[in-house]
Structure formats: structure tokens, C-alpha cells
Image (cartoon, helix red, strand yellow):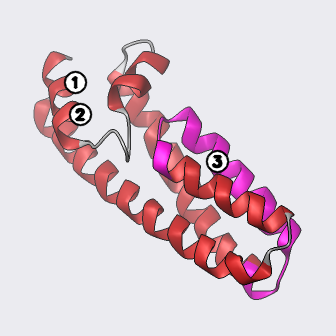
Amino acid sequence: MGQIMTTVSAATSREILDGEELLARCMGNWDFALRVLGKFRARLEADVADLDQALGVQDWDLLARLAHRIKGASASVSALQLRQRAAELEHAARARRVAELSTCVERLRHESNRLVQELSVLELDACEAR
């Protein structure tokens, strides 16, 4: 586990994913943490696609609900910057600040992409460390 923890610390930026905090949440079990991250990633990719659809049909309530779900899930896996972007989107959607929504969705999408890239590296490094 020590080698995986070193890999996680080196491979991730705390701004994108706080690996130490995630490890603590998973009681030191990186195999479990990696499974959690895999499920999170799959749900995140689906939710981001749904954000685009909600924005396209101007369903602000759905946009707020999706952002809220992403915010909570991001906090659970210690993806702090993504959590912040989701909170901004949720707030703008609930306040019906329509002029801001496209920008908020784009920022969230950008942060989601950064996180997915980090997760890909993390998964590869974890496989190599075994």
C-alpha cells in the first residue's frame, strides 16, 4: 500500500483530488478507494452529459439537481475543485441566472475533464504498483 500511496500523492494535485483525504475516508483501503473512484467516474460522465441536455432544453431545475448530485459526490471523493464548480452551477441554476449557466457548465466540464485525466493516471499507476 505504501507504494500506491506514494503514487497517489505524486500523481494527483490536491486541488483536483486530495488522495490523502480520500484514503482516510476509505479507512486506508486503496482497493476500495479505486472502486469508489471508478463508480464516481462513470456517474460523473453520465451526469455531465445530462447537464448539456438540461441546458439545451432550459430545464433549470434539472440542471440544479444534477449540479447538486455532482457537488455531493465530488465532496465524497475529495475532488474539491470539481465540488466548487458544481456548487457555482447549482447556485446559478437555482437563482435562474441564465446568462451565467453556459459558463458555469463549461467550467464544470473543464474541471470534470481534468479529474477524469487524473483518475486515468491514478488507475494506471495503481495497476503498475501491484
Report whether 73 appears left or right of 35.
right
Q: Residues within 10 Å of mark 3 (few under 14, many from 20)?
A: many
Read off the residue under disc 1: 5
Question: Residue 99, located in which quarter of the rendered image?
Answer: bottom right
Identify which amino acid the numbered label 1 is placed on: Met
- Quarter of the rendering containing residue 101: bottom right
Residue 71, numbered label: 3
Q: Residue 50 has which mark?
A: none
Query: Mark 2 Cα within 10 Å, few/some/many (few <14, many 20+)?
Result: many
What is the three-letter code of the residue carrying label 3? Lys
Cβ–Cβ under 8 Å for marks 3 and 2? no
Identify the residue position indicated by label 2 in the image. Answer: 8
> Where in the figure is residue 46, as x and y percent of width and height?
60, 64
Regarding mark 3 in the picture, which secondary structure is present there? helix
The quarter in which the C terminus is drawn is top left
Q: Is residue 111 left or right of residue 70?
A: left
